[in-house]
Amino acid sequence: MLVLFIYTQKMADNEIRNLIIISTFIFALAPTFVVIYIMLYNQRRKQHAREKAQMRETFEAEIVKAEQEIKEQTMQTIGADLHDNIGQLLSLTSLTLKSIEPEDSDKITPKVNSAIELISNSIQEMRLLGRLLQGEQLISQGLEAAIRHEIKWLEKSGKYKVIYLCEDELPASNPDKDLIIFRILQEILNNIIKHAMATQLAITLEHSDGIKCLCISDNGIGFDPDKPRSDQIGMGLSNIQKRASLLGGEAIIESKINKGTSITITIPYP
Amino acid sequence: MILFMLITCLAETLGIYIKGQYLADPENVRPNVWVYNILLIFQAGFISAMFASLFKVHVKSGPVILIGLALLSILYITEQIEHGFFKKHAITTIVMSVLFIIYSYYYFYLLLKDERDINLAYYPGFWWVAGVLFFYFGSIITNLYYEKIRDFVASPTPYLRYIYNVLNVLLYACWSYSFILRKWPTTR
């Protein structure tokens, strides 16, 4: 009887011992997982913060680059305009004035009038140039105003008919994003001027559900989007896509040979 | 910290000595439980003070720690009145374990909320708290069933000792690593 009691007691001891050891082991596992989880989570969080900082840096560098490019574009336009337009007008004025002969009094008055008209034209052109310089600051007044100004300058050449559609009510602006969107537009217009041989352009600027959409289409010669392009065009288009993705959006380029090109930029806004 | 370690060492030595005496003469010598009941006061005080110091970096810790200590004091006194010094203050021990587990999780939460670039593998506070969490989480089962084990099992101490040995190794390993990190900070 005593042996049976001792045996039963031993069995109970063993069972309870096993139960406690297993429970303790399971309970000790919980903090192990917690510690590992917290270390991993913290590591991932740090990595995320580093990536975010890096993205911010890239974004800021891109803004500086875009500002620089807008300035360069403005200077190029001014240089070309001074050489091709105002320079020609002033040369013509100089020639007209030089051709005046004091002996031939009948022709003096028309020639002087012609010179005055040429100088007036020059002054008008200078004013427009002045406005272009101001236009560089236009971006601070909003994307819509800057685009309108760019179109006015494009139309002045007389080569393009531009249709511009813009929503009346656009949300509060984001100057950094506006700057890059404006630079994308300039890049697209440059491509159109240099390669598209277009006569008509349609530009629309819309905003819905937190997405800003800029669409530029032309009736130019177009290209095959699947074919590798010459370096300069390729770089221009890849720049457009890179900048759109930097803003968290995308650039969809659609084109067919002899059927024009359409580029749609969608960007989360503001 | 050094003072607490010294007190712990003294208590453990005294505990072993009294256990020897008790095993030799169980009729006249009382078990060593009372030594650990006294050590409980130092444990509660020291670990709460350490948590207060760790929390202070992130939040105002005073009220939380004081409420915890007040709760433990009430339980300790109640148990003292109820069964005296020579029986283990089991409820106080369990509540203290739960309290320190909650403090540990709260500290981890504060670390995750911290905006600073902290590498937890080399952060002393994290490892000190990890040691506390391992020890109190691991020992909670033995504490919870201590009374039952004592009543039902003929000789509960051998395997309880093994469990406590493993948990002590974990606790002091984490604390030693934390001490090394604090004493010789790395640039990592």
Image (spheres, rainbow, N blue to C red):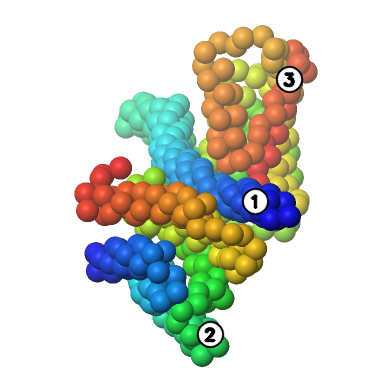
Query: Could you tell me which secondary element the residue under label 3 belongs to?
Result: strand
Task: Please tell me how crowded label 1 is: few (under 14), some (14-19), or many (20+) other residues with Cα within 10 Å.
Answer: some
Residue at image point 44% right, 43% down = A50
CA gap, disc 3 and disc 1: 87 Å
Q: Nearer the viewer, residue A168 or A37?
A: A37
Mark 3 and mark 1 in contact? Answer it, CB < 8 Å: no
Amino acid beneath label 3: Ser
Do discs 2 and 1 share a chain?
A: no
Query: Would you place residue A54 above or below residue A3 in this image?
Result: above
Residue at the far bottom: name it: B81
Q: In this view, does B92 lie to the left or right of A9?
A: left
In the image as oriented, which residue stretches furthest toward the front?
A: A1
Q: In this view, does A160 lie to the left or right of A46?
A: right
How packed is label 3: few (under 14 Cα within 10 Å), some, or many (20 or more)? many
Q: Nearer the viewer, residue A243 or A117?
A: A243
Three-letter code for the amino acid on which mark 1 is drawn: Lys
The image quadrant of residue A57 is top left
- Three-letter amino acid code of the residue under disc 2: His
Question: Quick check: A245 left or right of A78?
Answer: right
Q: In which quarter of the image is the N terminus of chain A?
A: bottom right
| Residue furthest to the left | B184
Quadrant in the picture for residue A9 = bottom right
Q: Choose mark 3 or mark 2, whichever is in front.
A: 2
Which residue lies under the disc numbered 2? Answer: B83
Chain to which mark 1 belongs: A
Which residue is rendered at x = 55% and y = 58% of the image?
B155
Residue on which disc 1 sits? A10
Where residue A39 sits in the image (x, y, percent)?
Answer: 48, 46
Q: Distance between the residues labelled 3 and 2?
A: 90 Å
